[in-house]
Image: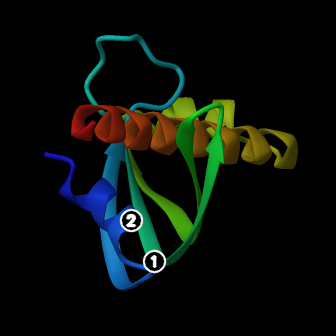
Amino acid sequence: KNVKFFNLLNKPKNKGRMILHLVLPPKKSSQKPNTSILIQNATRKIEVNFQKGKFVFNFDINANVAVIEKTNAHLIKEHYDNKKNIHNLENEVQKEINKKLQNMLYELQ
């Protein structure tokens, strides 16, 4: 189920492409994924620290990301129609990927 997200963490460099399906605004908590994004040439760094008796892992993932499909194109046109909102879209994609990765890591523990 989370193989693509695991591959982002497992390999220092992912050559080629992968498609991830996310729920982006406007959204509801129970909504099915409404956006597909293409990730290319992902790289990651892992920093390991020990704080308060626990290991802390920081993952820095860098990738080229493109929105390739949104089930309601009208919403994305209105919601992300200027440069300011493009930054908001980038933040939403980042938050959603972080949430998916954190959930996967929690399940692995």
Relative to 15, does residue 5 appear above or below in the rendering? above
* Front residue of 63 and 61: 61
Q: Secondary structure at mark 1?
A: strand
Residue holding disc 2: 8
> What is the three-letter code of the residue carrying label 1?
Gln
Residue at the extreme left: 1
Quarter of the image containing the C terminus? top left
Relative to 25, does residue 17 appear above or below in the rendering? below
Look at 67% across and 48% down and name the residue there.
90
- Image quadrant where residue 93 sits: top right
Residue holding disc 1: 40
Lateral position of residue 91 relative to residue 21, left or right:
right
Image location (x, y in percent) of residue 55: 53, 45
Lateral position of residue 90 relative to residue 15, left or right:
right
> What is the three-letter code of the residue carrying label 2?
Leu
Crowd around label 1: few <14 · some 14–19 · many ≥20 (10 Å): some
Q: Are marks 2 and 1 in contact (CB under 8 Å)?
A: no
Look at 46% across and 33% down and name the residue there.
99
Q: Is residue 22 visible?
A: yes
Look at 52% across and 64% down and name the residue there.
66
First reached walking from the N terminus: tag 2 or tag 1: 2
